[in-house]
């Protein structure tokens, strides 16, 4: 497994390949994302412990979704049990390393949350979170502002964790080496990743915000969530599919699944 430097415009290619991959099995990928969202919401009902459990399992779930991408290319059926792929290996060391990586991820997220609480007014988001009041354009603007700040703070975590789960599961790397290799892959190809993240920022933040504001202007703000939520869910699923494209682009030696150029 070798690091592969790519051109800046490869960021667009990754997005396009993610769209192609999603189109091969849209219902299967949407099912996996809905499952994750549903289970995450259930976990939140358990104070602290539930959130901590989800964070620890996130690397394993990431491997599961990447495995689903691989299966789709190989024309195999996607089953919900694909999320257990990281724990189905015959190598017990991989199982332990995936959980260790999850613990590192959880600690990084909690640290990032403490920093975020210093710059984000979470009180302003309570009406949106609790559904106590109708969603207004002001609330949506505050939401997307918070997402922007959170996204900036998340960049170092993302660079460390972007490829780490699959490097642990598929390249048999220890967590520290996988984290370093992931960081180097992201930094080496920072131009492509900047292009890639810019595109997804427009799709996931600018477009929904614009749609919400437009519906508020024409007096249909109460229906905004019925338009924005499905669009955001579909776009998020396509973005997850494009993660596999970044993996294929940044590392050589994993050429057994082909994506269109």
Image (cartoon, rainbow, N blue to C red):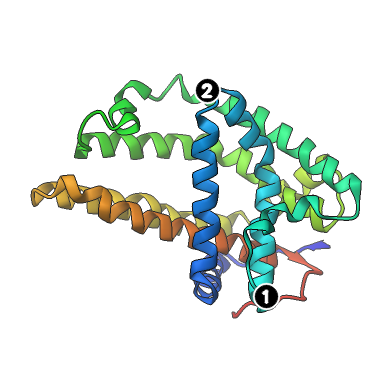
Quick check: 171 left or right of 233?
A: right
Q: Kindly identify which residue carries mark 2.
A: 115
* Mark 2 and mark 1: Cα distance apart in space: 43 Å
Closer to the camera, 22 or 188? 22
The structure residue drawn at horizontal position 70% and vertical position 62%, both measured from the top left corner, is 67
Q: Position of residue 72 (x, y in %)?
A: 63, 73
Residue 260 versus residue 252 in the image, above or below: below
Q: Counting other residues with Cα less than 10 Å from the Cα at mark 1, is it few (<14), some (14-19), or many (20 or more)?
A: few
Residue 26 versus residue 240 in the image, above or below: below
Closer to the camera, 41 or 159? 41
Name the mark on residue 11.
none
Which quadrant holds the N terminus? bottom right
Quick check: 10 left or right of 250?
A: left
State the count of labels.
Answer: 2
Q: Earlier in the sequence, mark 2 or mark 1?
A: 1
> Quarter of the image holding residue 247?
bottom right
């Amino acid at each position: 497994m070798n690091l592969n430097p790519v051109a800046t415009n490869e960021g667009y290619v990754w997005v396009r390949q993610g769209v192609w991959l999603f189109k091969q099995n849209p219902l299967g990928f949407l099912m996996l994302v809905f499952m994750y969202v549903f289970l995450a919401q259930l976990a939140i009902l358990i104070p602290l412990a539930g959130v901590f459990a989800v964070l620890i399992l996130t690397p394993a779930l990431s491997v599961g979704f990447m495995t689903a991408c691989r299966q789709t290319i190989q024309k195999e059926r996607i089953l919900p049990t694909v999320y257990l792929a990281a724990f189905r290996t015959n190598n017990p060391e991989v199982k332990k390393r995936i959980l260790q990586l999850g613990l590192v991820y959880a600690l990084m997220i909690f640290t990032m949350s403490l920093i975020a609480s210093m710059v984000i007014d979470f009180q302003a988001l309570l009406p949106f979170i609790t559904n106590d009041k109708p969603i207004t354009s002001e609330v949506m603007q505050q939401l997307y502002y918070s997402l922007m700040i959170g996204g900036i703070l998340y960049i170092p975590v993302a660079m460390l964790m972007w490829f780490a789960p699959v490097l642990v599961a598929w390249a048999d790397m220890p967590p520290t080496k996988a984290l370093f290799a992931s960081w180097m892959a992201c930094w080496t190809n920072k131009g492509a990743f900047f292009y890639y993240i810019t595109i997804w920022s427009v799709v996931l933040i600018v477009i929904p915000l614009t749609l919400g504001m437009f519906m508020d202007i024409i007096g249909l703000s109460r229906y905004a969530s019925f338009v924005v939520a499905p669009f955001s869910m579909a776009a998020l699923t396509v973005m997850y599919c494009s993660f596999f494209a970044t993996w294929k682009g940044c590392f050589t030696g994993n050429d057994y699944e082909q994506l269109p150029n």
